[in-house]
Image (cartoon, rainbow, N blue to C red):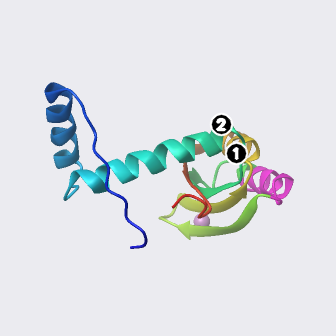
């Protein structure tokens, strides 16, 4: 790891106890790693709200027997081709398909794409996961 800086943090005992309980539940090995992740999360939120470029994945499950759904999904994906990097399709069982759509671009387009897909009749369990594009240390 490059260029580590140590700094002191002062906080109320009760707050520290709650924090330690939280990081235990999340399996962090030490406070530093937990604080690093919290900082990264806040920086990512800032990138998101400032509509800076982010990357991530939209996943959803749908019934491919649902009338016209497949064509609608493909139409939506073409409308958002500028933010879609790749799509992966998995045939889960006789009815259900899982699709993973890798995205990169501005948060407003990505969330519009995610919401449009999730709103299609027959699409279930949609979720959007976002990471930075490597700008955050
Ligand atoms: Ni399928």
Q: Position of residue 128 (x, y in %)?
A: 56, 48
| Foreground: disc 2 or disc 1 | 2
State the image quarter where residue 88 is shown. Answer: bottom right
Q: Mark 2 points at which residue?
A: 49
| Up/down of 49 relative to 134, above or below | above
Helix, strand or loop under label 2: helix
Mark 1 Cα shell of 10 Å, populated few (<14), some (14-19), many (≥20): many
Q: Does the magenta stretch include residue 79?
A: yes
Q: Mark 1 points at which residue?
A: 107
In the picture shown, does residue 85 fall above or below 116? below
Span highlighted in magenta in the image: 70-82
Tell me if residue 23 can be seen. yes
Q: Does the magenta stretch include residue 75?
A: yes
Instruction: Please name whichever residue, 62 or 105, is drawn nearer the observer in this view of the structure.
Output: 105
Residue 71: percent from the left, percent from the top?
A: 79, 55
Locate the N terminus and report the quarter of the image it occupies: bottom left
In contact (CB < 8 Å): disc 2 and disc 1 = yes
* Mark 2 within 8 Å of ligand 1, using the beta carbon: no
Instruction: Judge: label 1 CB < 8 Å from ligand 1.
Output: no
Q: Relative to 130, say whether 16 is above or below.
A: above
Q: Is residue 118 visible?
A: no
């Amino acid at each position: 790891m490059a260029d580590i800086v140590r700094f002191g943090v002062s906080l109320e005992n009760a707050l520290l106890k709650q924090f330690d309980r939280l990081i235990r539940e999340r399996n962090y090995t030490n406070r530093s790693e937990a604080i690093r992740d919290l900082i990264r999360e806040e920086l990512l939120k800032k990138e998101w709200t400032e509509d800076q470029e982010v990357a991530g994945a939209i996943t959803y499950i749908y019934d491919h027997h649902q009338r016209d759904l497949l064509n609608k999904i493909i139409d939506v994906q073409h409308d958002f081709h500028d933010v879609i990097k790749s799509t992966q399709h998995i045939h889960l069982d006789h009815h259900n398909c899982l699709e993973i759509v890798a995205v990169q671009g501005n948060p407003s387009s990505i969330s519009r794409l995610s919401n449009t897909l999730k709103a299609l009749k027959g699409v279930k369990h949609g979720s959007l996961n976002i990471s930075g594009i490597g700008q955050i240390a």
